[in-house]
Amino acid sequence: MATVDDDRVFGLFKFGRQDYIRDFVRGELYMNTLQYFQNLEAGRGDELRRDPYEGVGSLVQATGGVLSLEVEGAYRPVVEIVGPLRWRPPGGIKANVFCMYTLRGPVRPDPVDELNFRFGDTFAGITNGDEFLRRIRAPETPGRQLTWGPVEYVDERTYQGTMGIFRKRLSFRYQSEFRIALVPGDDEPYILRVGDLSDIVIAGPLSELNRRLVARPPGYADAGQPQG
């Protein structure tokens, strides 16, 4: 599977409410719009998902620049710019995304940052990532495609360049996100139906995930004992 920052991807997980995870196991991938995450209001209890940088095409570092206003044929400075300028393509980036968690190496004693436990009460772990991605198919609509991969995290105070669907700010790095994107997307949520996934998914209480995850070296049986 794909890697980011030279870290191996050991597994894919989906976090959410029990009813949403139940739908996922049935093969229903609920894909929200980028605009949904962009327009979530601050202070509404959904700070994990809210990101005003969603849908930004690129960042340009502009600290020290000056915003000027034309007055009577001459430009006069109004304010000094601090921080990056966010450029959005005309009409925005139209995409629907399905967000997952990637377990990346090296595996720590508590491999999943507990901030992610606020996403819901249930986890779904993919036991065969290659098979999961094999079952994903784009809708049979001309001009639309599915693309996927891990999110790269950048420091918006220093980074300059393309953002798009697969780059987010460094403050979201704890989410270790893997995205499946439908491009171009709809103006409303889209449900991608991939068929029953119960044969390649293990589900359980999200609060117990770190306790139940363990990395074992080669030569160990499922029960954790060396093989004879």
Image (tube, rainbow, N blue to C red):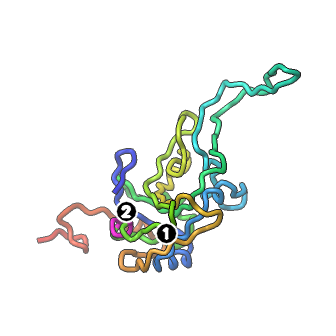
Q: Quadrant of residue 197?
A: bottom left
Residue in front for this viewpoint, 166 or 8:
166
Q: Which residue is located at x 39 percent, y 45 percent? A: 5
Secondary structure state at the residue bearing disc 2: strand
Residue ID for mark 2: 11
Q: Tell me if 179 is positioned left or right of 60 in this view.
A: left
Residue 35 painted magenta: no
Q: CA distance from mark 1 to mark 2?
A: 26 Å
Looking at the rendering, the stretch of residues picked out in magenta corresponds to 129-133
Give me the disc on residue 139.
1
Q: Which residue is located at x 11 percent, y 71 percent? A: 228
* Dominant secondary structure, magenta: helix
Q: Tell me if 225 is positioned left or right of 58 in this view.
A: left
Q: Position of residue 114 (x, y in %)?
A: 51, 60
Q: Which residue is located at x 48 percent, y 58 percent? A: 179
Q: Amino acid at mark 2?
A: Gly
For disc 2, the neighbor class at 10 Å (few under 14, some 14 to 19, many from 20) is: some
Q: Position of residue 147 (x, y in %)?
A: 45, 58
Residue 130 painted magenta: yes
Residue 222 versus residue 151 in the image, above or below = below
Q: Quadrant of residue 110?
A: bottom left
For disc 1, the neighbor class at 10 Å (few under 14, some 14 to 19, many from 20) is: few
The mark nearer the N terminus, 1 or 2, is 2
